[in-house]
Amino acid sequence: MLGRRENTGEHEAMRKMKNEFMVNWDGLRTKDTERVLVLAATNRPFDLDEGYSGTDLKNLCVTAANRPIKEILEKEKKEHAATLAEGKPAPALSGSSDIRSLNIEDFKHVHQQVYQAAIKLPGDA
């Protein structure tokens, strides 16, 4: 549904439906006390139409998905530094089974980072 609209093999009706969806998406508003959650999954983020995903949604999802991996890399870096300081051999690297599943906290964390970056004023440290 959210694939690129320039796909030449796509039926005209699908393009019209996507355009209508985008028009409604663009006008989507909420009250201060309400929130809209858009949940999407893809293994082909490069095929998303920029009109839907923009850079915000795509970057939010990619950054959240990378968070468990960053945690492992930070852990390995600390363990490696500690073993070097003690003169011990480097510990074994983590495997794919050590990567935890993505969860809602990953999205909350990334959203908070994006929100904080958006409200920083020029010249703020």
Image (cartoon, rainbow, N blue to C red):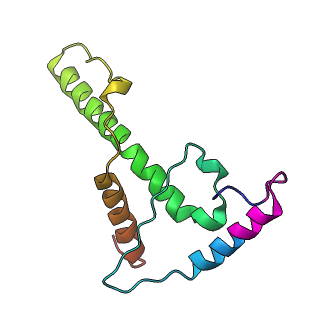
The answer to which quarter of the image holds residue 15 is bottom right
The residue at the far right in this view is 8
State whether residue 112 is above or below residue 35: above
Residue 108 coordinates in the image, percent (x, y)? 32, 60
Q: Which residue does the image show at 45% across and 59% down from the upper left? A: 39
Residue 77 coordinates in the image, percent (x, y)? 29, 32
Q: Is residue 19 left or right of residue 43?
A: right
Residue 59 coordinates in the image, percent (x, y)? 50, 57
State whether residue 88 is above or below residue 27: above
Quarter the N terminus occupies: bottom right
Residue 13 is one of the magenta-drawn residues: yes
Q: Which residue does the image show at 32% across and 24% down from the upper left? A: 94
Q: What stretch is highlighted in magenta?
A: 6-18
Q: Which residue does the image show at 84% across and 54% down from the upper left? A: 8
Q: Which residue does the image show at 82% across and 63% down from the upper left? A: 12
Query: Which of 37/93 is in front?
Result: 37
Residue 119 coordinates in the image, percent (x, y)? 38, 77
Quarter the C terminus occupies: bottom left
The residue at the far front in this view is 13
Query: Which of 65/123 is in front?
Result: 65
Residue 15 is one of the magenta-drawn residues: yes
The answer to which quarter of the image holds residue 109 is bottom left
